[in-house]
Amino acid sequence: MSAGEAVLLPHPATGRPFPSPVPPGSGWPGDPAEADTPVAHDPAEAAALAASAGSLGEVVARSTVCRACPRLVAWREEVARTRRRMYAGEPYWGRPVPSLGEEHPRALVVGLAPAAHGGNRTGRMFTGDSSGDWIIAGLHRAGLADQAASVHAADGLRLRRTRIVAPVRCAPPDNKPLPAERDACTAWLDAELRRCEEDVRAVLALGAFAWGSALTAARRAGWSVPRPQPRFGHGAEAVLTTPAGRDVRLLGSYHVSRQNTSTGRLTVAMLDDVLRRLADLAGEPAAPA
Protein backbone atom coordinates (compact mmCIF):
# COMPACT_ATOMS: atom_id res chain seq x y z
CA MET A 1 0.00 0.00 0.00
CA SER A 2 1.41 3.39 -0.98
CA ALA A 3 1.88 6.20 1.51
CA GLY A 4 -1.32 8.17 2.03
CA GLU A 5 -3.56 5.46 0.58
CA ALA A 6 -6.74 4.95 2.61
CA VAL A 7 -7.03 1.76 4.66
CA LEU A 8 -10.21 -0.12 3.79
CA LEU A 9 -11.85 -2.17 6.54
CA PRO A 10 -15.01 -4.33 6.43
CA HIS A 11 -18.26 -3.08 7.92
CA PRO A 12 -19.09 -5.40 10.86
CA ALA A 13 -22.55 -6.23 9.47
CA THR A 14 -22.25 -6.12 5.69
CA GLY A 15 -18.58 -6.91 5.19
CA ARG A 16 -18.31 -4.13 2.63
CA PRO A 17 -14.97 -2.29 2.86
CA PHE A 18 -14.85 1.41 3.75
CA PRO A 19 -12.19 3.97 4.58
CA SER A 20 -12.35 5.92 7.83
CA PRO A 21 -13.94 8.46 7.73
CA VAL A 22 -16.64 7.19 5.37
CA PRO A 23 -17.26 9.24 2.20
CA PRO A 24 -20.90 10.24 1.67
CA GLY A 25 -22.86 8.12 -0.76
CA SER A 26 -20.42 5.21 -0.62
CA GLY A 27 -22.93 2.62 0.62
CA TRP A 28 -22.67 2.77 4.42
CA PRO A 29 -25.92 1.42 5.95
CA GLY A 30 -28.31 4.25 6.66
CA ASP A 31 -26.17 6.99 5.09
CA PRO A 32 -28.68 9.71 4.07
CA ALA A 33 -26.15 11.69 1.98
CA GLU A 34 -24.90 11.32 -1.57
CA ALA A 35 -21.54 12.22 -3.05
CA ASP A 36 -22.99 15.51 -4.31
CA THR A 37 -24.82 16.54 -1.11
CA PRO A 38 -23.88 20.20 -0.51
CA VAL A 39 -21.36 20.81 2.27
CA ALA A 40 -21.38 23.65 4.82
CA HIS A 41 -17.88 24.99 5.54
CA ASP A 42 -18.85 27.61 8.13
CA PRO A 43 -21.82 28.43 10.39
CA ALA A 44 -23.39 30.80 7.85
CA GLU A 45 -23.35 28.11 5.18
CA ALA A 46 -24.80 25.61 7.66
CA ALA A 47 -27.67 27.97 8.43
CA ALA A 48 -28.34 28.60 4.74
CA LEU A 49 -28.26 24.91 3.78
CA ALA A 50 -30.48 23.90 6.69
CA ALA A 51 -33.02 26.61 5.87
CA SER A 52 -33.13 25.84 2.15
CA ALA A 53 -33.53 22.06 2.49
CA GLY A 54 -36.72 20.87 0.85
CA SER A 55 -37.49 18.03 3.25
CA LEU A 56 -36.54 16.54 6.59
CA GLY A 57 -34.47 13.92 4.78
CA GLU A 58 -32.55 16.64 2.99
CA VAL A 59 -31.88 18.48 6.26
CA VAL A 60 -30.45 15.30 7.77
CA ALA A 61 -28.38 14.47 4.68
CA ARG A 62 -26.83 17.93 4.62
CA SER A 63 -26.10 17.79 8.34
CA THR A 64 -24.06 14.59 7.91
CA VAL A 65 -21.51 16.24 5.63
CA CYS A 66 -21.19 19.52 7.57
CA ARG A 67 -17.66 20.86 8.11
CA ALA A 68 -18.55 24.14 9.81
CA CYS A 69 -16.49 23.58 12.98
CA PRO A 70 -12.75 22.97 12.28
CA ARG A 71 -11.94 21.63 15.77
CA LEU A 72 -14.76 19.08 15.65
CA VAL A 73 -13.93 18.03 12.09
CA ALA A 74 -10.29 17.44 13.03
CA TRP A 75 -11.21 15.52 16.19
CA ARG A 76 -13.88 13.24 14.74
CA GLU A 77 -11.67 12.35 11.75
CA GLU A 78 -8.57 11.74 13.85
CA VAL A 79 -10.56 9.38 16.08
CA ALA A 80 -11.83 7.62 12.93
CA ARG A 81 -8.31 7.15 11.59
CA THR A 82 -6.68 5.96 14.80
CA ARG A 83 -9.66 4.01 16.21
CA ARG A 84 -9.87 2.30 19.60
CA ARG A 85 -7.95 -0.96 19.85
CA MET A 86 -11.07 -3.09 20.33
CA TYR A 87 -12.51 -1.66 17.09
CA ALA A 88 -9.26 -1.51 15.14
CA GLY A 89 -10.52 -4.00 12.56
CA GLU A 90 -13.61 -2.03 11.50
CA PRO A 91 -14.18 1.31 9.79
CA TYR A 92 -15.37 4.41 11.61
CA TRP A 93 -18.11 6.67 10.26
CA GLY A 94 -16.18 9.79 11.33
CA ARG A 95 -18.82 12.32 10.18
CA PRO A 96 -21.71 14.23 11.81
CA VAL A 97 -24.23 11.62 12.93
CA PRO A 98 -27.78 11.69 11.51
CA SER A 99 -30.89 11.81 13.64
CA LEU A 100 -32.69 8.53 14.19
CA GLY A 101 -36.36 7.59 14.08
CA GLU A 102 -39.74 8.57 12.70
CA GLU A 103 -40.21 11.42 10.24
CA HIS A 104 -43.45 12.39 12.02
CA PRO A 105 -42.60 11.75 15.68
CA ARG A 106 -44.90 12.33 18.60
CA ALA A 107 -41.90 12.10 20.96
CA LEU A 108 -38.50 13.76 20.56
CA VAL A 109 -35.52 12.52 22.57
CA VAL A 110 -32.77 15.15 22.78
CA GLY A 111 -29.24 14.05 23.65
CA LEU A 112 -25.95 15.93 23.71
CA ALA A 113 -23.51 14.79 21.01
CA PRO A 114 -22.26 11.49 19.53
CA ALA A 115 -19.68 9.49 21.44
CA ALA A 116 -16.23 9.20 19.87
CA HIS A 117 -16.38 5.40 19.72
CA GLY A 118 -20.18 5.08 19.64
CA GLY A 119 -22.07 7.15 17.08
CA ASN A 120 -18.84 8.45 15.56
CA ARG A 121 -17.92 4.81 14.87
CA THR A 122 -21.28 3.33 13.91
CA GLY A 123 -22.87 6.29 12.13
CA ARG A 124 -26.06 6.17 14.20
CA MET A 125 -27.26 7.95 17.33
CA PHE A 126 -26.90 6.05 20.62
CA THR A 127 -25.45 3.00 18.89
CA GLY A 128 -22.47 0.91 19.86
CA ASP A 129 -21.79 2.18 23.39
CA SER A 130 -23.15 1.87 26.92
CA SER A 131 -25.31 5.01 26.65
CA GLY A 132 -27.02 3.52 23.62
CA ASP A 133 -27.50 0.24 25.45
CA TRP A 134 -29.38 2.07 28.20
CA ILE A 135 -31.62 4.37 26.19
CA ILE A 136 -32.55 1.90 23.44
CA ALA A 137 -33.34 -0.85 25.95
CA GLY A 138 -35.43 1.67 27.89
CA LEU A 139 -37.30 2.80 24.78
CA HIS A 140 -37.97 -0.85 23.97
CA ARG A 141 -39.42 -1.49 27.43
CA ALA A 142 -41.64 1.56 26.97
CA GLY A 143 -42.90 0.32 23.60
CA LEU A 144 -41.06 3.04 21.65
CA ALA A 145 -38.45 0.81 19.95
CA ASP A 146 -38.87 -2.54 18.22
CA GLN A 147 -35.72 -4.10 19.69
CA ALA A 148 -33.74 -3.75 22.87
CA ALA A 149 -30.24 -3.35 21.43
CA SER A 150 -28.54 -0.85 19.13
CA VAL A 151 -25.34 -2.38 17.79
CA HIS A 152 -24.68 -0.96 14.32
CA ALA A 153 -26.53 0.89 11.57
CA ALA A 154 -27.58 -2.33 9.80
CA ASP A 155 -29.19 -4.10 12.77
CA GLY A 156 -32.77 -3.24 11.76
CA LEU A 157 -33.65 -1.02 14.73
CA ARG A 158 -36.86 0.99 14.30
CA LEU A 159 -38.24 3.56 16.71
CA ARG A 160 -41.99 3.95 17.19
CA ARG A 161 -43.50 7.45 17.23
CA THR A 162 -40.08 8.66 18.36
CA ARG A 163 -37.12 10.54 16.96
CA ILE A 164 -33.69 11.00 18.55
CA VAL A 165 -31.87 14.25 17.83
CA ALA A 166 -28.69 15.88 19.11
CA PRO A 167 -27.93 19.59 19.52
CA VAL A 168 -24.34 18.84 18.41
CA ARG A 169 -23.92 16.35 15.55
CA CYS A 170 -20.14 15.72 15.75
CA ALA A 171 -18.27 13.89 18.51
CA PRO A 172 -16.51 16.59 20.59
CA PRO A 173 -13.25 16.18 22.56
CA ASP A 174 -14.01 15.15 26.16
CA ASN A 175 -17.74 15.20 25.27
CA LYS A 176 -17.63 19.00 25.66
CA PRO A 177 -18.53 21.09 22.62
CA LEU A 178 -17.52 24.74 22.74
CA PRO A 179 -20.32 27.34 22.86
CA ALA A 180 -19.49 28.45 19.31
CA GLU A 181 -19.74 24.83 18.11
CA ARG A 182 -23.08 24.37 19.85
CA ASP A 183 -24.34 27.57 18.25
CA ALA A 184 -23.12 26.60 14.78
CA CYS A 185 -25.06 23.33 15.00
CA THR A 186 -28.37 24.93 16.02
CA ALA A 187 -29.37 25.37 12.38
CA TRP A 188 -29.79 21.61 11.93
CA LEU A 189 -31.80 21.18 15.13
CA ASP A 190 -34.01 24.16 14.31
CA ALA A 191 -34.70 22.87 10.79
CA GLU A 192 -35.70 19.45 12.13
CA LEU A 193 -37.89 20.93 14.84
CA ARG A 194 -39.77 23.04 12.27
CA ARG A 195 -40.59 19.93 10.27
CA CYS A 196 -41.67 17.93 13.34
CA GLU A 197 -43.58 20.66 15.16
CA GLU A 198 -47.08 19.62 14.10
CA ASP A 199 -46.63 16.06 15.35
CA VAL A 200 -44.58 16.34 18.54
CA ARG A 201 -46.45 15.93 21.82
CA ALA A 202 -43.51 15.47 24.20
CA VAL A 203 -39.77 16.17 24.33
CA LEU A 204 -37.39 14.24 26.57
CA ALA A 205 -34.15 16.04 27.41
CA LEU A 206 -31.31 13.74 28.47
CA GLY A 207 -29.26 15.94 30.76
CA ALA A 208 -29.00 19.63 31.53
CA PHE A 209 -27.29 20.45 28.21
CA ALA A 210 -30.16 18.89 26.27
CA TRP A 211 -32.73 20.62 28.53
CA GLY A 212 -31.22 24.02 27.82
CA SER A 213 -30.86 23.26 24.12
CA ALA A 214 -34.50 22.17 23.87
CA LEU A 215 -35.73 25.34 25.57
CA THR A 216 -33.64 27.68 23.43
CA ALA A 217 -34.65 25.81 20.25
CA ALA A 218 -38.29 26.14 21.29
CA ARG A 219 -37.87 29.90 21.75
CA ARG A 220 -36.19 30.25 18.36
CA ALA A 221 -39.17 28.40 16.85
CA GLY A 222 -41.57 30.88 18.44
CA TRP A 223 -42.85 28.54 21.14
CA SER A 224 -44.02 29.97 24.44
CA VAL A 225 -41.64 29.01 27.28
CA PRO A 226 -42.51 29.64 30.96
CA ARG A 227 -40.69 32.39 32.84
CA PRO A 228 -38.59 32.02 34.84
CA GLN A 229 -37.02 29.31 32.73
CA PRO A 230 -37.93 25.84 34.02
CA ARG A 231 -35.07 24.20 35.92
CA PHE A 232 -33.65 20.87 34.86
CA GLY A 233 -33.90 17.84 37.09
CA HIS A 234 -34.63 14.18 36.75
CA GLY A 235 -38.38 13.87 36.36
CA ALA A 236 -38.82 17.60 35.83
CA GLU A 237 -41.67 18.68 33.56
CA ALA A 238 -42.56 21.91 31.81
CA VAL A 239 -45.31 22.89 29.41
CA LEU A 240 -44.29 24.62 26.18
CA THR A 241 -46.83 26.01 23.73
CA THR A 242 -46.40 26.04 19.96
CA PRO A 243 -47.42 29.02 17.80
CA ALA A 244 -50.51 27.00 16.85
CA GLY A 245 -51.55 26.99 20.52
CA ARG A 246 -50.81 23.31 21.19
CA ASP A 247 -49.07 22.29 24.42
CA VAL A 248 -45.92 20.16 24.31
CA ARG A 249 -44.60 18.59 27.50
CA LEU A 250 -40.85 18.87 28.15
CA LEU A 251 -39.49 16.07 30.36
CA GLY A 252 -36.10 15.85 32.03
CA SER A 253 -33.91 12.83 32.73
CA TYR A 254 -30.35 12.44 33.82
CA HIS A 255 -28.23 11.56 30.82
CA VAL A 256 -27.63 7.85 30.17
CA SER A 257 -23.87 8.38 30.38
CA ARG A 258 -21.68 5.76 32.01
CA GLN A 259 -20.81 8.32 34.68
CA ASN A 260 -24.46 8.42 35.75
CA THR A 261 -25.43 4.78 35.23
CA SER A 262 -22.34 3.21 36.82
CA THR A 263 -22.63 5.33 39.96
CA GLY A 264 -26.35 4.76 40.47
CA ARG A 265 -27.27 8.39 39.91
CA LEU A 266 -29.51 7.06 37.15
CA THR A 267 -31.08 3.64 37.67
CA VAL A 268 -33.14 1.49 35.32
CA ALA A 269 -36.24 2.19 37.40
CA MET A 270 -35.66 5.96 37.25
CA LEU A 271 -35.21 5.88 33.49
CA ASP A 272 -38.26 3.66 33.00
CA ASP A 273 -40.45 6.05 34.98
CA VAL A 274 -39.58 8.92 32.64
CA LEU A 275 -39.86 6.81 29.48
CA ARG A 276 -43.28 5.50 30.52
CA ARG A 277 -44.38 9.10 30.91
CA LEU A 278 -42.95 9.91 27.47
CA ALA A 279 -44.76 6.94 25.93
CA ASP A 280 -48.04 7.94 27.56
CA LEU A 281 -47.75 11.48 26.21
CA ALA A 282 -46.84 10.14 22.76
CA GLY A 283 -49.90 7.90 22.80
CA GLU A 284 -47.88 4.69 22.65
CA PRO A 285 -48.94 2.03 25.19
CA ALA A 286 -46.17 0.50 27.24
CA ALA A 287 -44.93 -2.92 26.18
CA PRO A 288 -46.23 -5.91 28.16
CA ALA A 289 -44.08 -6.88 31.12
Image (cartoon, grey):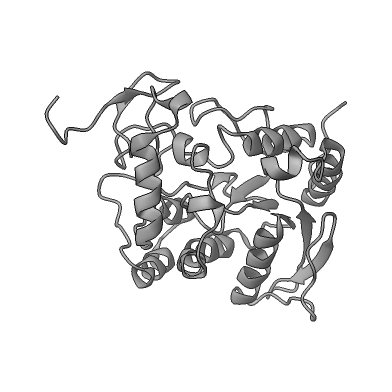
Q: Nearer the viewer, residue 55 or 263?
A: 263
Q: Quadrant of the N terminus?
A: top left
Q: Position of residue 111 (x, y in %)?
A: 63, 52
The residue at the point 40 percent across, 43 percent down is 32
The residue at the point 76 percent across, 70 percent down is 240
Q: Position of residue 89 (x, y in %)?
A: 38, 22
Looking at the rendering, which quadrant does residue 268 occupy? top right
Q: Nearer the viewer, residue 104 or 207?
A: 207
Q: Quadrant of the C terminus?
A: top right
Q: Is residue 258 visible?
A: yes
Q: Is residue 159 visible?
A: no
Q: Furthest-left residue in view?
A: 2
Q: Position of residue 132 (x, y in %)?
A: 63, 37
Q: Nearer the viewer, residue 74 or 204?
A: 74
The residue at the point 80 percent across, 69 percent down is 231
The residue at the point 37 percent across, 65 percent down is 49
Q: Nearer the viewer, residue 25 or 230?
A: 230
Q: Is residue 149 above or below residue 281?
A: above
